[in-house]
Amino acid sequence: MENIQDTIKDAKDALPNVTPTPPGLKAESSAHDLKSRLEWGEPALTILDVRDRESFNKGHIMGAMPMPLDRLIDGAQTIDKVRDIYVYGETEEATTQAASRLSEAGFRNVAKLKGGLEAWKAIAGSTEGTEEISHPGSEAYNVVSRLAHHQQTQHK
């Protein structure tokens, strides 16, 4: 009996000591990348919505900060330069422009959120805003359904 337990212990010791870790920041991140980090409960990131204030008020990624492109650098001065920042705009071009401006201003960890708000909504990411509240959808508060949807769409 002792031999079997020693063999099991030796086998366990031979396995690499792997601790699960959340996905890291990528220069171009998908909605799934961001959602995975949020599901890990990582507080050390900031989401910036660089669309105009009216668009932001209608709907945005839950927890995103409004930072219109024309006031981006002034508004971002309160953010630590080494903090992970995910940025999205009305178009991919606006997102790229915002990421470039942030990098030029000395922010070191900036990721463009590919597909922006629409990609986030496509994977049933949490949103808020006047239009989002008015039309949350029948499955908006069904956590099991949202997790199942995320699992199904993550590998597409």
Image (cartoon, helix red, strand yellow):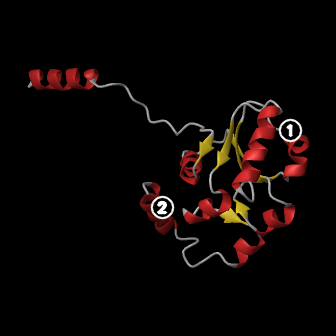
| Residue 148 appears in the figure | yes
Residue 48 seen: no
Answer left or right for 122 relative to 59: left
Is 109 left or right of 13, judged from the image as shown? Answer: right
Task: Categorize mark 1 by other alpha carbons within 10 Å: few (<14), some (14-19), many (20+).
Answer: few
User: Closer to the camera, 114 or 63?
Assistant: 114
Q: Percent x, y for residue 76?
A: 84, 41
Q: Is residue 68 above or below residue 79?
A: below
- Return the x and y of residue 3 as percentages of the image width and height: 10, 21
Residue 36: x percent and y percent?
Answer: 53, 48
Q: Residue at x 75, y 59 (%)?
A: 90
Picture quarter with the C terminus: bottom left
For label 1, the residue is 78
Residue 147 disc label: 2
Measured from the top left, where is residue 151 in percent x and y?
A: 43, 58
- Which numbered disc flags the more N-terminal residue, 2 or 1? 1
Residue 153 left/right relative to 39: left
